[in-house]
Amino acid sequence: LFERVSARLKAQVGQDVYASWFGRLKLHSHSKTVVRLSVPTTFLKSWINNRYLELITSLFQQEEPEIMKIEILVRTATRSVRAGIEEAVAAVETAPASQARRMAGPQTVAQAAAGLTEKAQQRQPSHGPLFGSPLDARYTFDTFVEGSSNRVALAAAKTIAEAGASAVRFNPLFIHSSVGLGKTHLLQAVANAALASARSPRVVYLTAEYFMWRFATAIRDNDALSLKETLRNIDLLVIDDMQFLQGNSIQNEFCHLLNMLLDSAKQVVVAADRAPWELESLDPRVRSRLQGGVAIEMEAPAYEMRLEILKRRLEVARLEDASLEIPAEILNHVARSITASGRELEGAFNQLLFRRTFEPNLTVERVDELLAHLVGAGEPRRVRIEDIQRVVAKHYNVSRQELVSSRRTRVVVMPRQIAMYLSKTLTPRSFPEIGRRFGGRDHTTVLHAVRKIEDLIAGDTKLSHEIELLKRLINE
Ligand code: ADP
Ligand code: MG
């Protein structure tokens, strides 16, 4: 069974991706309904869980329909990979090069940590990225659905992929959003498109973790110079999950690289789970350099976009099985109920596809049952600043335009400050970001508003009740 699934998996994701992520996947145990697989590192485990679990589950289910669940275990659960990376980084941060070698531990740990072997690196086809994390061929602009939540980010990404180095207008381009909203997809689409273009630029796509590991081992092996030489000659640097970058000397290296690339008008694209000015753990020089470009936030997809994502997935699935039909009613229902992110939508869709082979007459009610665990899954429901503005405006009988306008009459000042206060307490947005959403105000204005409302609440029970009421209304 495991061999058959592995073969299908290899066929589906391609030889290179398979070798990078699944080469060391093993069968651990197998009951009637549960299959346990193992990998050597927690990094691989979370990578596979995040990206491939649904695929693997459906492949197993295609072989044996009774299987309900796939679990990924870590074989030697003695040490987390994160710890492995941190250890390697710490070693080069604290010790002279000669000692670092010994302290950094066996190279295999760090390699396992990155989920890649040198061999896998060397096998990269010559038109592929110079080095770095493997690209997923499915992550292209064609498969990326556009909507109001990502329009600006997509436009910027496309401009860069098309114009390459001449698109210095957005340099660096910084994309941020919470998890599952398409950052990795978009970044890889940029890398894939650039690689496919006639200019054939030299592209490097890396996660920040991979960058750390690569530099830590290079420094340890006295090989940093040749690594820097390689990176000096690239045209496009794409870095994912920037929030994980840490360590002084590594950030120092990153800072040099960033300066060098930006100063020679090479394009840099970065993604993180928060805005550049909120990356508190980052070296201030790196942060300020990142802030010197354009930061664009992507939001959760609206209903129409979720429906479109499902429709596209259906089209793809029909390439394999033209007889496949999912009634519009059911797709609509899924798009309406799964609100969290692209990741949950993908999971829901795979469930749906799989179920249809056994229950051809799926009803909306049945789909509801099947997807119950995905509805409202992932993150807690995200409150949006627009919703706060809408509710507050309505409650105080002012318009939303007035709320974000520059008017300073008493009737709007207080509601505006309350709306800012609620934005800061109910969303993860930063002061500058909130300022921007309230008609381009300065972050100190927001800070002032939040402090003022906090003070008022402390001494005014009527106001604090009112705020509680507003919170309830916003959460409805
Ligand atoms: P992030 O990196 O922000 O956590 P990902 O790029 O990994 O998110 O996206 C999670 C899943 O949702 C992926 O399968 C991705 O293809 C899908 N997805 C997210 N946004 C879109 C979109 N706009 N169009 C199509 N698929 C999307
Ligand atoms: Mg990602």
Image (tube, rainbow, N blue to C red):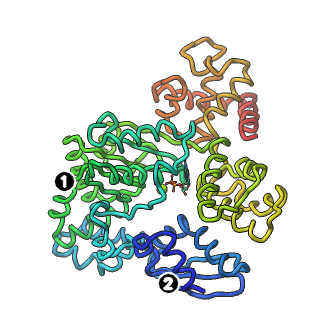
Examine the rendered structure and indicate whether residue 120 appears above or below residue 231: below
Examine the rendered structure and indicate whether residue 213 appears above or below residue 439: below
Residue 201 rendering spot, x and y as whole percentages: 26, 51
Q: Secondary structure at mark 2?
A: loop
Residue picked out by circle 2: 75
Residue 52 rendering spot, x and y as whole percentages: 54, 68
The C terminus appears in which quarter of the rendering? top right
Which of the pair 40/445 is nearer the observer?
40
Lateral position of residue 260 relative to residue 273, left or right: left
Residue that appears at 50% across and 38% down: 430
Which of the pair 323/112 is nearer the observer?
323
Mark 1 and mark 2 lie on one chain; the one further toward the N terminus is: 2
Residue picked out by circle 1: 232
Q: Nearer the viewer, mark 1 or mark 2?
A: 1
Q: Are marks 1 and 2 in contact (CB under 8 Å)?
A: no
Residue 288 rendering spot, x and y as whole percentages: 31, 40
Residue that appears at 41% across and 76% down: 19
Examine the rendered structure and indicate whether residue 473 appears above or below residue 310: above
User: What's the amino acid at mark 1?
Assistant: Arg
